[in-house]
Amino acid sequence: MVSPNPRDVFVNCPFDAAYKPIFNAIVFTVVRCGFRVRCALEADDAAENRFGKICRIIDSSRYGVHDISRTEADGDPPLPRFNMPLEVGLFLGAKRFGGRRQSEKKCIIFDRERYRYQRFMSDIAGQDIHAHGGDIATLIGELTAWLRNESGLRNIPGGVRIAAEFEIFGSALPEIYRARNLSSEEVTFADYNDIVVQYLTASE
């Protein structure tokens, strides 16, 4: 087994349409800061168990970005979705019990409100929870500062700069999709990640 890649960032968040603007901002920010996004959407292999895939990605990632803001109950009977808290636990467990090669893992945990987690996930009390309030610019600022501080890469610009770049990128996306013969509804994570990487590489 190899050590976690110091450029790999595991992203644990909702993947539904309502959350997609925030997810897209996370992907853009992570790539803009010089890292590689890893998440459960990166491969669609029916031969691989989803839980096993998540464990494999966590194992190989030095950093983790977790958003536990989506815990509302739905369905009949109404039940909450706790996939995100579960994956936080997996990441923290890997750091705690994974031996020397996993002990250098670092993660940032987001929620809508800073202390809301205490009502459903109080065992992580003492962790520094970052509140984004559903605001993309706030999330980008918090995530950028965290990646710069934890990685020691001082060439990472500030969040205000990256948020402005993300807004410009967003205005260019429709034309990029048209050039690729894609509608926004059918863009996969692999498509979007590839577009972000190519766009930022061309902008250097």
Image (cartoon, rainbow, N blue to C red):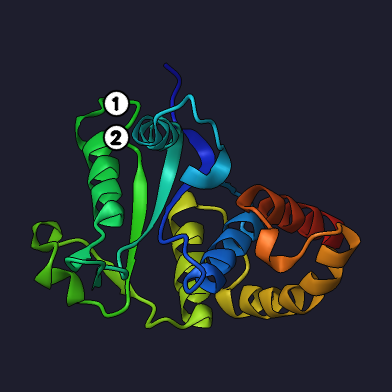
Q: Which part of the image, by quadrant, shows the C terminus?
A: bottom right
Residue visible at 25% across and 77% down?
Answer: 114
Q: Identify the residue under disc 1.
A: 100
* Observer able to see residue 5: yes
Where is residue 141 shown, x and y percent of the image?
50, 75
Relative to 4, does residue 36 appear above or below in the rendering?
below
Dots 2, 1 in contact, CB < 8 A: yes
Q: Mark 2 sits on what residue?
A: 103
Residue 98 pos. (x, y %): 26, 28
**Residue appearing at x 86%, y 71% in the figure:** 175
Depicted 88 relative to depicted 68: above or below: above
Q: List x then y, in percent, for residue 130.
A: 32, 71
- Quarter of the figure with residue 53: top left
Q: Which residue is at 87% across, 66% downward?
A: 178
Disc 2 residue type?
Answer: Ser
In the displayed structure, does residue 161 sit left or right of residue 14?
right
Q: The N terminus lies in which quarter of the figure? A: top left
Which secondary structure, mark 1?
loop
Q: CA distance from mark 2 to mark 1?
A: 5 Å
Q: Nearer the viewer, residue 71 or 157?
A: 71
Left or right? Give the position of 12 relative to 117.
right
Going 21% across and 64% down the picture, which residue do you hit?
80
- Residue farthest along the right direction in this orientation: 179
Can you name the residue that lies furthest to the front here? Answer: 76
Q: Position of residue 136 (x, y in %)?
A: 51, 79
Label 1 packing within 10 angstroms: few (<14), some (14-19), many (20+)? few
Classify mark 2: helix, strand or loop.
loop
